[in-house]
Amino acid sequence: MARGRAGDARAYDALLGETAVWLGRYFQRRLPAAHVEDAVQETLIALHHRRHDFDCSQPLRPWLAAIARFKWVDRLRLMEREKTPVPCDSHVASHEIDVLSCHAVSGLLGQLRPAQAEAIRLVKIDGLSIMEASAATGQSQSLIKINIHRGLKRMAAGCLALAD
């Protein structure tokens, strides 16, 4: 990075080439294949624009990983707006799993009947009891249980379909 900033075009090209390979692996574990190359390119552009902010006395990888993480979150937001499904089997760090899981669950809940999604949100996500969810929705306790069972079954089928 220091040599590239000093005007060494070969060093800067090598840096971008190696960084592109690393970013490709980074995003392949976090995004559907159709979004990987765009995320890599957006991150490389951000690196290029922010290269003068980098402190050359510090390691490059954490700085690069921070930029990549921001671009990954931007890509997840874009996918949410586009209603792009996120794979359920991503192998990423735990805080990233939380974000990815939240996005995936939100997408799967959106595919359910409203009564099923509401029952699952209230009981399984918000932690209400069956009786409390029944009172909140006006559904009988039996219907809450049925909606949860059928909704979870449908979500599981949707998650398996995404993995294929």
Image (cartoon, rainbow, N blue to C red):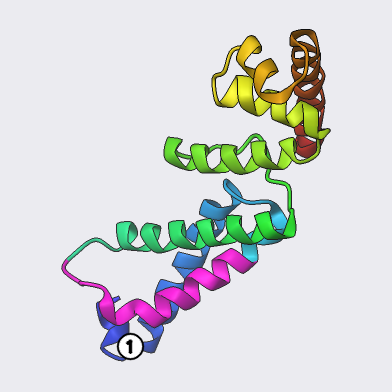
- Could you tell me which quadrant the C terminus lies in? top right
Magenta span contains residue 160: no
- Image position of 159 with respect to 51: above or below: above
> Residue visible at 31% across and 62% down?
63
Residue located beneath label 1 in the image: 8
Apparent side of residue 160 relative to residue 63 in the rendered image (left or right): right
* Magenta stretch: helix, strand or loop mostly: helix
Apparent side of residue 43 relative to residue 101 in the rendered image (left or right): left
> Residue visible at 82% across and 19% down?
150
Apparent side of residue 12 relative to residue 53 in the rendered image (left or right): right
Which quadrant of the figure has residue 132? top right
Residue type highlighted by circle 1: Asp
How would you rate the neighbour count of disc 1 (Cα within 10 Å): few for under 14, some for 14-19, many for 20 or more? few
Residue farthest toward the left in the current orientation of the protein: 57
Q: Position of residue 70 (x, y in %)?
A: 45, 60
Q: Position of residue 17 (x, y in %)?
A: 49, 71
Which quadrant of the figure has residue 41? bottom right
Label 1: element kind: loop
Q: Position of residue 115 (x, y in %)?
A: 79, 28
- Image position of 48 with respect to 153: above or below: below
Q: Position of residue 13 (x, y in %)?
A: 44, 80
Magenta segment, which residues? 38-57
Given residues 154 and 42, the one toward you in this image is 154
